[in-house]
Amino acid sequence: MADLLRTGLSGLQAFQRAIDTTSHNISNASTEGYSRQRVEVGTRPADPYGNGWVGNGASVQTIRRVYDDYVSQQTRTTSSGLERMDVFASNAERVNNMFGDTDAGLTASLQKFVDAFQGVANAPASIPARQVLLSEATALKDQLQYFDSRLNDMDAEVNANLKGEVSEINAIAQGIAKLNQDISTGMARSGGQPPNDLLDQRDKLLDQLAEKVSVSAVKQDGGQVNVFIGNGQPLVLGAVASELTTTQDNFDASRLSLGLKTQGGVVDITSNITGGKLGGVLDFRREMLDPAHNALGRFSVGLAETVNAQNAKGIDLSGVLGGDFFAVGDVEVLPNTLNAGTGTLAVTRANVGGLTEKDYTLELTGSGWTLRDARNGTTVPMTGTGTGADPFVADGMELVVGGTASVGDEFLVRPTRSAVADMSVLVTDPEKVAAAAPIRSAVNSANLGTGTISAGEVLDGTNAQLRSNVTIQFLTASTYSINGAGSYTYTAGSNIDVNGWRVQISGSPSVGDRFTVADNTSGTGDNRNALLLADALKKPILDGGTTSLNDGVSKFVSGIGVSTRQAQVSRDAQAAVHAENEATMDGISGVNLDEEAANLLKYQQAYQAAAQVIKIADTLFQTLLSATGR
């Protein structure tokens, strides 16, 4: 009878644990991160008898957490990707809304400026029209600087976000390390049985960490996990948590980088961080914020170069040749704070058509100076030797090195970014707008032939003889002289270049016919240079002379719009994938109250049956005592 009692007691204890566990599941049905638990019951060792083995009931082998490591890791991966894309898309939307605004965006601001030039062309002697032009020029400059300021604000926000995320990641890492220690201790005390609630708490922290940065967890003996972030940087090893920190960038003190504290010092891991909010912030800065900053600067340089060049080819209301209309900031050169030598670097813009939207690093290697794309490290070809007489030439820049640099010394070159902040309108007097052309061509009234001459185009406004009088006289029907000198072959419509200007003569001139090009002394009503100024913004100047400023702005704004839309689509797609993974995980680990209620009823009945076995054992035992007591 003792065996029957022991068997009944084993069932009673097993089903008591099952009822306790089911109750625990029901109580935590709404607990975030809780995984349902299930009692694993096994048979106790049987006793041999001559005619077979007789069982001794059941025992609880373990209380198992219903959990799938693979699905969990998949869910963390999609969570990390979703957070990264959400941060990127939300920030991209802000940039897109700023530049794409129909009333105050970059395209609208440029068009108002072009329209103001057209207004001067329509009334070149009108002071109010000229004042409107200067007002629109100032408004365009202010708008560009507003955009630049907003991008700087976003850069500062990136720094603040990095600090906040790093602080939270460090707190989570400490929590995981502490739970690693508690889990290891708990398993040692229980003979290797898993402390399920602690495992859930640790997995919840891992899920939170995945929202910050891509994460992988590798299980170790004793129940602990090692946690790696980014591209394999160790964050938690057993019960020891490493610490992330933010450090000043070696080139730009206003920009923060990410570092991992080690025994040997802080290691920069900025380029190794992927996924999560942290990765999204860094990706936004690298893939959209920096290119937008540089594109805005390149446009400003192109605008100033174009307008200045054409304005210098005209004359103002006083008959004086025009000067620079805009001024922009210089190239930004930042030495690495770790440079060991005394090397210097001076960089100037040599060709606006060669400028790109990139930043560069110039490094002294064992084989000489090497120029690289700062974003991806690819080598950029250069010509020249880097001296003042023979500078390095690359991507529209001229670079001159000086001093004594050491191998490994670096310089960060930003060709266009600082152009906007120091931009200014140099023409403040409306009379100084060079709307007229400095030369005027004419056909001698006594000419007998049918020859005509173009109005004239200024090639070089700095030519000392630009405004000198020139007479072109035909010696024969096919030859002509210039100011009585030379004999030049005439081809109808071909260019005639003299003293920094160009004209074309067409038709059939007769012998002795004369054409003159003279100083435009009374050009107050002349609008030729104003028309050229308005038209200059439509001429290809960027990207090696293939893209106009107007097209460049359209390309820039539409590019941001396309990138933003792609980010939104990717975010929505990732959200759907993540929701599916979460649903799968909930189907595996989530608590189903209907199922738990059925289990509770089943275990209750089993418990009652086991109690009945004990009662029967007691009755039989009492019967035996009564029988033997007589």
Image: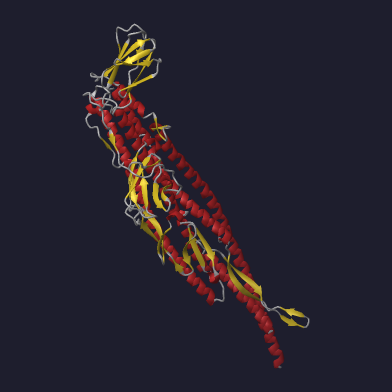
What is the x, y in percent for residue 379? 45, 47
Kindly identify the residue that appears in the image at 51 percent across and 60 percent down. Answer: 216
Q: Is residue 295 above or below residue 604?
A: above
Q: Quadrant of residue 506?
A: top left
Numbered circles on residues, count: 0
Q: Residue shown at 45%/69% (left/top)?
A: 240
In the rendered structure, the answer to whether residue 2 lies left or right of residue 432 reads right
Task: Determine if residue 140 is in view.
Answer: yes
| Residue 98 visible in the current orientation | no
Q: 523 and 293: which one is in front? A: 523
Residue 267 pos. (x, y %)? 41, 60
| Residue furthest out toward the front | 486
Along the line of sight, the residue nearer the viewer: 12 or 445: 445
For the C terminus, give its image quadrant.
Answer: bottom right
Tell me which colouring the rendered structure shows.
secondary structure
Q: In this rendering, is residue 187 above or below 236?
A: below
Measuring from the top left, give residue 544's x and y in whole percent: 42, 34
Q: Residue at x 58, y 59 (%)?
A: 70
Side (left or right) of 511 relative to 585: left
Q: Residue furthest right?
A: 51
Q: Quadrant of the N terminus?
A: bottom right
Residue 405 location (% of width, % of height): 35, 53
Q: Residue at x 30, y 10 (%)?
A: 444
Is residue 461 or residue 389 the one in the foreground?
389
Residue 484 located left or right of residue 266: left
Q: Is residue 337 above or below residue 525?
A: below
- Image height check: is 605 above or below 273? below
